[in-house]
Amino acid sequence: MTPEPPLSPADVEAVARAAHAGQTDKAGRPYAEHLRAVAEGVRRRGGDADQIAAAWLHDAVEDDALPETWLRSAALSRRTKDIVLAVTKRAGEPPEAYAARILATPGALLVKEADLAHNADPARLAVLDEATRTRLTGKYARMRALLGLGEEGAETARGSR
């Protein structure tokens, strides 16, 4: 049996867009905009093809857009799968355990950094009500601290992470 050829970058993007079709973010924007922004953030920070693929898929399992069984059997690199699973929050998981898993998985920190940067974008937060904006700002700052990341919006190349 010949192994399935790996998904191309365009295939990964198409799968992610289809999986999240109809979903919106907290501001009511199409969720695919967030995925695109995270993938672009990974690319700008020097991320490689595995990390960019993981960026497109980073919320797919967590949001039940794709089952974990799909991810495990998909024609993706082991590293991409590991990164996606590392950045997938688990129900009831303490933030410290989540951060530790990200830090222990090669390549995952860069994807999470790009995710946090887009989530904490002042333009995105500005359209939310004050209570939600305050709650999310604190949540994102705490995760950045647990991950050892600097100030919000720090644009450094962390492609090796």
Image (cartoon, rainbow, N blue to C red):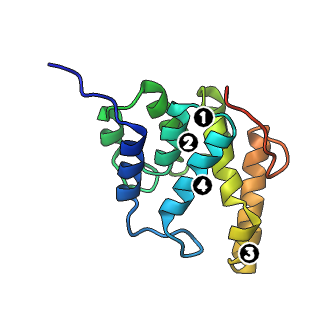
Characterize the local packing of mark 1: few (<14), some (14-19) or many (20 or more) Cα atoms within 10 angstroms: many
Residue under the point 54% across and 54% down: 36
Q: Nearer the viewer, mark 2 or mark 4?
A: 4
User: What residue sits right under mark 3 in the picture?
Assistant: 126
The three-letter code of the residue at mark 2 reads Val
In the shown orientation, is residue 153 left or right of residue 81?
right
Contact (Cβ within 8 Å) of mark 3 with mark 1: no
Compared to residue 161, the image places residue 128 above or below, namely below
Marks 4/3: CA distance? Answer: 17 Å
Question: Who is closer to the viewer here, 65 or 76?
Answer: 76
Q: Quadrant of residue 6?
A: top left
**Where's residue 94, x and y in %?**
63, 46
User: What residue sits right under mark 4 in the picture?
Assistant: 37
Contact (Cβ within 8 Å) of mark 1 with mark 2: yes
Q: Which residue is situated farthest in the left direction here?
A: 1
- Residue 76 visible (yes or no): yes
Q: Quadrant of the N terminus?
A: top left
